[in-house]
Amino acid sequence: MSVLSLRLPEDVHDRLNRLAEKTKRTKSSFIKEMIETSLEEYEEAYLALERLNEKNARYLTTEELEEELGV
């Protein structure tokens, strides 16, 4: 497993500490969970942007899409 260091604003660090203490979980477990969740969202967003920027991209209206999907 890799190690990553980061600097947090004091207020965010305090909130994370309080959450860890209340739940009896480690700060690292929360940070890993948050990164995994957010990373997937970012990957999907960038994939969508890449597809929008493709030179051969085909854009459909809602009606055209529904017709193509048979909806």
Image (tube, helix red, strand yellow):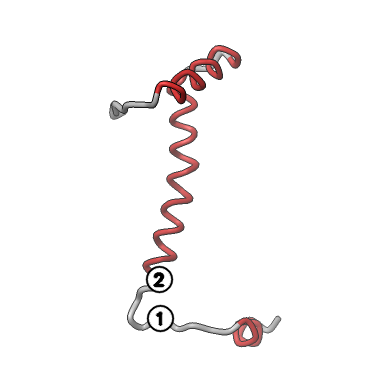
Q: Are marks 2 and 1 in contact (CB under 8 Å)?
A: yes
Relative image position of residue 56 (x, y in whole percent): 36, 83
- Of 16 and 47, the residue lying toward us: 16
Which residue corresponds to mark 1?
A: 57
Find residue 46 and report its horizontal and vertical position in percent.
40, 59
Q: Residue at x 32, y 26 (%)?
A: 7
For residue 12, side relative to residue 18 (left or right): left
Q: Residue at x 47, y 18 (%)?
A: 14
Place of residue 12 in the rendered image (x, y in percent of width and height, measured from the top left): 46, 25
User: Where is the C terminus found, in terms of image quarters?
Assistant: bottom right
**Mark 2 nearby-residue class (10 Å; few <14, some 14–19, many ≥20):** few
Labelled disc at residue 20:
none
Residue with the mark numbered 2 = 51
Amino acid type at mark 2: Arg
Provide the secondary structure element on which disc 1 rests: loop
Residue positioned 41% across, 73% down in the render = 52
Q: Amino acid at mark 1?
A: Ala
